[in-house]
Amino acid sequence: MEWRLASGTGFCEVGGELLFLDLRRDRYLALRGEDRVTFDRLRSGATGDQRAMTRLAGSGLIVAGNGGRAIRATEIIVPEEDLSACSARSGSGWGTAFAAARGLIWARLAMRPARLARTAEYLAAAKADRAGAGKQSKAEDLAAGFAASRWLIPVAPRCLVDALALDWLLLREGVAATLVFGVRLNPFNAHCWLQTERAILTGTAAEARNFTPILTVG
């Protein structure tokens, strides 16, 4: 039997811990003990005994299926630059603020626990349709306009809502960026940001680089 990560699931290793993000259940968790041994065997290509696999599948992190993809930890290069280091700039105005407000309204609905996994699936599909549409300078221009008009909108800043809102706005303009979820330990904390290969588009590069990517969309 072949196995793969469940949809909306990603993992990484941080400080010796094997951490997972399960968007469908809106949870972060660490895999330890027998379950970790079984998972490590699985991602190395060995399935292990049926009892152990059944127990691991019960966690909801893996599912059976034909044509399973290799199970790998999330890997992405986090840029060292953010909008403050980019030359591209876009002025803000009421049109930009109106578009940003629409994006934030969409994001506040899209980030609800019961909808976040479906939101990630929608964004991934939309970005697949725009393969090769990196357009990094345009993404930076649009992100700069979003950031400049953000103070006009009475929605409290939050990493996830801002990243989702800008992602939605970029896709409306035919631009695909990467949504990244990250974690760190001691104490545990989670963060989310939007990036191109060149720059962090929401938040700062210094903040993003303090987190280990656990799941990417796009």
Image (cartoon, rainbow, N blue to C red):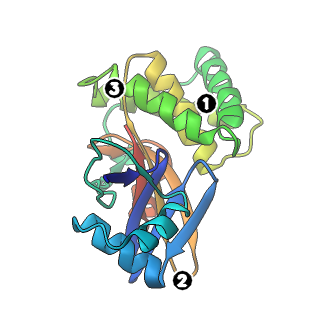
Extreme residue in the right direction: 154
**What whole-number distance in Å separates the C-alpha atoms at marks 3 and 2?**
36 Å
Q: Residue beneath label 3, please?
A: 128
Residue at the spot 66% in from the left edge and 22% down from the top edge: 102
Q: Tag 1: Cα neighbours inside 10 Å, few (<14), some, or many (≥20)?
A: many
Residue situated in front as seen by the camera: 118 or 34:
34
**What whole-number distance in Å separates the C-alpha atoms at marks 1 and 2?**
35 Å
Q: Residue beneath label 1, please?
A: 149
Tell me if I can see residue 103 in this picture: yes
Residue at the spot 36% in from the left edge and 28% down from the top edge: 176
Question: Amino acid under label 2?
Answer: Asn
Q: Residue beneath label 2, please?
A: 186
Extreme residue in the front direction: 50
Question: Amino acid under label 3?
Answer: Ala
Residue at the spot 39% in from the left edge and 59% down from the top edge: 213
Left or right of 24, for residue 140: left
Residue 89 spot, x, y in % from top left: 40, 30
Element class at badge 2: loop
